[in-house]
Image: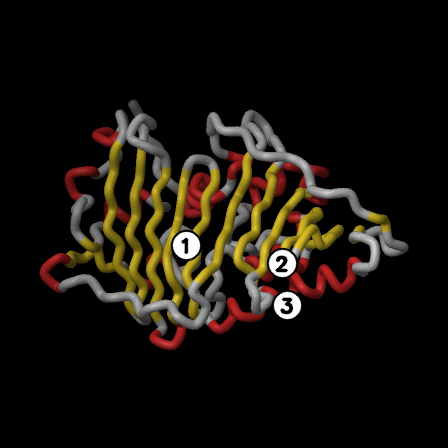
């Protein structure tokens, strides 16, 4: 079986974007409880202005900018979890794409401690043996990455000037309708065509959605301090893929730990075959 190389964009899409990945699960639909239209076209429950609800969502992402939190992302049968600790200029992310029954399953354990990055790669699935350059990929070792070769790579790099891997601040700025559905709970629609820079959305997905991109349903939750704790985008069906949910969560604001550098005896320099896999 021939295995194509992974581009950074395709990798991000496979990991985080239900709209472009094949999956047997179907996403949940619907925007929640009934609401009252407002003059601006946004919606909110009686007595709760839509503008106030949207501002609450915008404000809920402010704490993310401090760069001290834990996060998870899931969708299309793939997951990511990790922590960002901007005070130490470090971050860690563990990603799983697919499962052992897939043609190809990939696990990545990424550690960033500015100015360095390391990744441990695991491969599984029926086609794993056909991955180009497999014997030189140093599976099971942490591979030290050349920053000049991963700059701008959404799968392998990390930008400490943009500390949120999911880009929730960008997503909430695209909210077109919103209502408060309960204590710390919101629902509505978001125009994801305005959120191409969000790390959890790939521009190719937005293109595939067409006009549907302008009104993607979402739900959101904030904690007792008004900080975003959960955001779920209900991505409509696009192309050959079923509708799916993209779920993002945040926790441990201000209490995330610094990422630990891998032991020196477990580190090797990443070979050319590794970079080729993602280019």
Q: Where residue 228 sits: x, y (%)?
A: 56, 61
Q: Is residue 3 visible?
A: yes
- Helix, strand or loop at disc 3? helix
Answer left or right for 135 relative to 275. left
The nearer-to-camera label among 3 and 2 is: 2
Q: Residue furthest bottom?
A: 87
State the residue at coordinates (50%, 51%): 248
How far apart, in angstroms, are the residues tagged by discs 1 and 2? 35 Å
Sequence-earlier tag: 3 or 2: 3
Q: Where residue 140 sits: x, y (%)?
A: 17, 47
Q: Badge 2, how many Cα within 10 Å: few under 14, some, many 20+?
A: some
Quadrant for the N terminus, please. top left
The nearer-to-camera label among 1 and 2 is: 2
State the residue at coordinates (28%, 52%): 109
Q: Where residue 92 sits: x, y (%)?
A: 33, 60
Q: Where residue 266 sits: x, y (%)?
A: 13, 57
Residue corresponding to mark 1: 153
- Quarter-of-image position of residue 130: top left
Residue corresponding to mark 3: 59
Answer left or right for 29 relative to 72. right
Q: In this view of the protein, which residue sits in the foreground, 123 or 249?
A: 249
Residue corresponding to mark 2: 184
Pointers 1 and 2 in contact (C-beta within 8 Å): no
- Helix, strand or loop at disc 2? loop
């Amino acid at each position: 079986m021939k295995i194509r190389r992974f581009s950074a964009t395709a990798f991000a899409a496979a990991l985080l974007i239900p709209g472009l990945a094949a999956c047997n699960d179907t996403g949940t639909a619907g925007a929640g409880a009934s609401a009252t239209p407002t003059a601006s076209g946004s919606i909110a429950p009686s007595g709760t202005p839509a503008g106030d609800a949207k501002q609450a969502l915008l404000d809920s992402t402010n704490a993310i900018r401090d760069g001290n939190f834990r996060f998870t992302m899931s969708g299309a049968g793939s997951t990511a979890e990790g922590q960002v600790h901007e005070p130490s200029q470090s971050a860690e992310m563990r990603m799983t794409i697919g499962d052992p029954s897939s043609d190809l399953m990939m696990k990545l354990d990424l550690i960033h401690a500015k100015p360095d990055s390391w990744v441990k790669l695991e491969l599984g699935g029926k086609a794993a043996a056909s991955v180009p350059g497999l014997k030189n990929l140093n599976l099971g070792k942490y591979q030290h990455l050349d920053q000049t070769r991963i700059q701008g790579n959404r799968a392998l790099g990390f930008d400490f000037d943009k500390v949120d891997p999911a880009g929730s601040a960008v997503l909430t700025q695209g909210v077109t309708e919103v209502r408060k559905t309960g204590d710390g709970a919101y629902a509505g629609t978001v125009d994801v065509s305005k959120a191409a820079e969000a790390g959890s959305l790939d521009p190719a997905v937005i293109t595939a959605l067409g006009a549907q991109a302008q009104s993607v349903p979402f739900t959101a939750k904030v904690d007792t301090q008004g900080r975003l704790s959960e955001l779920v985008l209900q991505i409509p069906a696009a192309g050959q893929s079923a509708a799916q949910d993209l779920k993002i969560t945040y926790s441990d604001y201000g209490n995330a730990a610094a990422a630990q550098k891998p032991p020196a005896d477990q580190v090797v320099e990443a070979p050319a075959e590794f970079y080729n896999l993602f280019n």
